[in-house]
Amino acid sequence: MRNRNVLISGASVAGLTLAHWLQRAGFRPTVVERAPGLRRGGQAIDIRGVALQVVERMWLLDKVREVTTDMRGMSFVDGRGEELSRSTEATLTGGLIDNDDVEIMRDDLTTLLFDASRYGNEYLFGDAITSLTQDEDGVEVRFRHERARRFDLVIGADGLHSGVRRLAFGPESAFLHFLDSYLAIFSVENFLGLDHWQMYHTAGDALVGVYSARQNTEARAMLLFGSPGLDFDHRDPEQQKNILAERFADVGWETPRLLASMRDAPDFYFDSMSQVRLDHWSKGRVGLVGDAGYCPSPRSGQGTSIALVGAYVLAGELANHRDDHRAAFAGYQQLMWEYVRKNQRLAHRRADGTTRTPPAELARAANSMTLPGYPHQG
């Protein structure tokens, strides 16, 4: 069988899901990840619509539900911490708390996905791809540490700043579309004693939030602000922390304490709110999945769901066209295209200048495709 040895770059939601389904279909996946292990931290993420079917077909839905955030609601406070409003029905993305959607911490989900995909697959942690050379029969891959190896296919599942996309498709400036804001997430102590609860404070175009995690044993801090494009190195966390410290220096409430905690946070994340838009998600024997190919931005609330569905469909199409990667990539894009575009549109500003998505619109986008069935599911 041709096209059996597949290199996947990135061990997050899309990469781990793809590795699971490819291995189940008889492929030999290798996953390379720049970090020394699974990346910890990250925000609470949602699994909605057809993505729930993907998790169920992986036999993981019950395990996912066991570690949901069980968030009861949220409140907004002023600079002195006095409550201005509260809600037990809507999250920031407009999704209903009391519905079939699942909210889970990002690293809890990746741990479950890794446990489901680790046996029978090869993992290269602490390494990265440095070059790709394609020919008719395969891809010669050079790594930062591993010896050069040859693979039938290479899939970039390596996020917004995908190295695979840069090597095979060109500079990211051609594909990233900035949405005029920046987001930071990091772990903190649950010093507010939040009980499955979220608290937010707004000051102009800045938003500061804290919400409990891991059955209230810890919390996540979120800093969000609007801004023109900033010139920073996305691999320099100290530079990013300095940007945040300056931007939020005069914001009230618990912001000074959060900024102090940020300095030592082991899982600090900062990046722009951006989308990735390409006309084609493959070039020769190299393909893209998840944020690397079609990041909808955290503003959409659908990045995780799109990654799960995209990985499932890509694996299915590769299994259906084992000797024809061109047909597989074409089928993958045809099945996913409208679903991706509808979910990316959730992140666009509305006519009233807000980004709040009505629950019905979010549900329509999340369920806007019929999940295919593939023979290797059994």
Image (tube, rainbow, N blue to C red):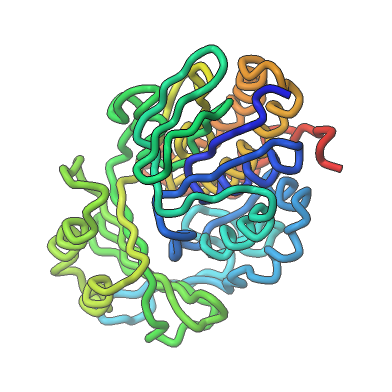
Residue pictured at 37% horizontal, 46% vertical: 145
Left or right? Give the position of 142 relative to 66: left
Q: Nearer the viewer, residue 299 or 94?
A: 299
Does residue 10 appear anywhere in the picture? yes
Q: Quadrant of residue 322?
A: top right
Q: Nearer the viewer, residue 269 or 74?
A: 269
Residue pictured at 36% horizontal, 62% vertical: 185
Left or right? Give the position of 50 relative to 70: right
Left or right? Give the position of 250 relative to 141: left
Q: Quadrant of residue 206?
A: bottom left
Residue pictured at 35% horizontal, 74% vertical: 77
Q: Return the x and y of residue 319 as percentages of the image width and height.
A: 74, 29
Instruction: Looking at this view, name the residue that lies furthest to the front.
Output: 147
Q: Return the x and y of residue 31 as percentages of the image width and height.
A: 54, 45
Q: Nearer the viewer, residue 228 or 24?
A: 24
Q: Is residue 320 above or below residue 32?
A: above
Q: Is residue 157 above or below residue 317?
A: below
Residue pictured at 15% horizontal, 61% vertical: 242
Quarter of the image where the N terminus is located: top right
Instruction: Looking at this view, name the residue that lies furthest to the top.
Output: 136
Q: Return the x and y of residue 245 as percentages of the image width and height.
A: 16, 65
